[in-house]
Image (cartoon, rainbow, N blue to C red):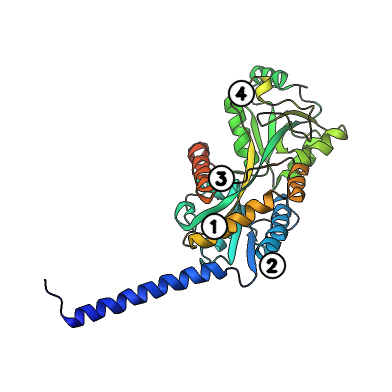
């Protein structure tokens, strides 16, 4: 097919426009950031996720040369804040602190979400992982093995609280019952805090919670820590044995965090944010903050590694959550 001068001229103009657009995007990424960045935390002010988000925001702001401002958008188990990030302009000025509740549990719990985790979001990098501890009332058997033996002899008589249907503490509690081959009675609460209060009063037997929340109850003699998740004991509570030490080598109970952005955010901007995140996680102050919260840093990671981690977590947990057939109405 022969090309006339008009075709050649049109092609040249289109090529020039494409090149200019590509140059503009590249230049924009190189200049980024030129204004404050919003970090959406999908939970309330003062929560563990909020505190971690604010620590990251402080250090990343110094690294990037622009303020990183935390915006709390709670509700829907984290789905409202996640939706804000998923639908934001993909320019790097709205990012989010992602959690396992938002990126894994909700995917299995809700038949319909206003966003697609796989298509509408991408990871900037991983932040941390927090092992959970099994805390028991003082009237409950004193060791994990004794607890399991009692539960097998008395099916359905041991109760465990949770932060509500489909919460982390509910899902890992069901998984514990499956791993130990026992039957437990689930008692949902409006948050782990209320469940922990009832446990300390002897109204419920078990609860999966963070060491920072559960340890004071044990120290005050109003509860006992039976087992902690992880490959090794926590430095925060070195006297608490792991599940693996007590006969459940494959059982795990934990939460994790990442930083996330709208899926179409330019790679150059994602890379800048990733570098700032990894640099922040390497700071002694940030390491101290995570250690005090009984968390372990998951950095440094690349965006691709972080995406793969989330995909693996969903492949592991979403089918199990859906099999529970939890009523979300």
Residue 147 at least partly seen: yes
| Residue 177 placement: quadrant | top right
> How many numbered marks appear?
4
Q: Where does the N terminus fall, quadrant-wise?
A: bottom left
Q: Mark 2 points at which residue?
A: 67
In the image, taking residue 60 as reference, residue 24 lies left or right, namely left
Question: Going from the N terminus, do you reach mark 4 or mark 3 first?
Answer: 3
Report helix, strand or loop for mark 1.
Answer: helix
Distance of label 2 from label 4 (alpha carbons): 44 Å
Q: Name the residue under label 1.
A: 271
Residue 9: x and y in percent read 24, 81
Report helix, strand or loop for mark 2.
Answer: loop
Depth-wise, is mark 3 or mark 1 nearer the camera? 1
Residue 261 at least partly seen: no
Residue 158: x and y in percent read 69, 27
Question: Going from the N terminus, do you reach mark 2 or mark 4 first?
Answer: 2
Q: Name the residue under label 4.
A: 249
Figure check: 108 above or below 55? above
Distance of label 4 from label 3 (alpha carbons): 23 Å
């Amino acid at each position: 097919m022969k090309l006339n001068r008009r075709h050649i001229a049109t092609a040249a103009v289109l090529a020039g426009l494409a090149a200019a657009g590509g140059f503009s995007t590249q230049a924009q990424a190189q200049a980024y950031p030129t204004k404050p960045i919003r970090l959406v935390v999908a939970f309330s002010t003062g929560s563990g996720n909020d505190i971690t988000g604010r620590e990251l925001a402080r250090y990343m702001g110094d690294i990037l040369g622009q303020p990183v401002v935390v915006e709390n958008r709670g509700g829907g188990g984290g789905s409202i804040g996640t939706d804000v990030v998923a639908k934001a302009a993909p320019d790097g000025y709205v990012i989010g602190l992602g959690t396992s509740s938002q990126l894994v549990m909700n995917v299995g719990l809700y038949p319909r979400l206003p966003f697609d985790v796989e298509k509408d979001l991408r990871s900037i990098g991983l932040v941390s992982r927090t092992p959970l501890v099994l805390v028991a009332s003082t009237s409950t058997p004193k060791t994990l093995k004794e607890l399991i033996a009692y539960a097998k002899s008395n099916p359905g008589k041991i109760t465990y609280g949770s932060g509500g249907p489909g919460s982390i503490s509910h899902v890992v509690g069901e998984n514990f019952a499956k791993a130990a081959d026992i039957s437990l009675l689930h008692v949902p609460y409006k948050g782990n805090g209320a469940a922990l209060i009832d446990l300390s009063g002897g109204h419920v037997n078990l609860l999966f919670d963070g060491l920072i929340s559960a340890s004071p109850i044990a120290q005050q003699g109003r509860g006992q820590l039976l087992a902690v998740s992880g490959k090794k004991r926590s430095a925060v509570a070195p006297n608490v044995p792991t599940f693996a030490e007590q006969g459940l080598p494959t059982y795990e109970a934990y939460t994790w965090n990442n930083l996330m952005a709208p899926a179409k955010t330019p790679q150059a901007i994602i890379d800048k944010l990733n570098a700032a995140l990894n640099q922040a996680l390497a700071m002694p102050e940030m390491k101290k903050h995570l250690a005090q919260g009984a968390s372990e840093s998951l950095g440094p990671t690349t965006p691709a590694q972080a995406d793969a981690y989330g995909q693996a977590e969903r492949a592991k947990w979403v089918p199990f959550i859906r099999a529970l057939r939890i009523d979300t109405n």
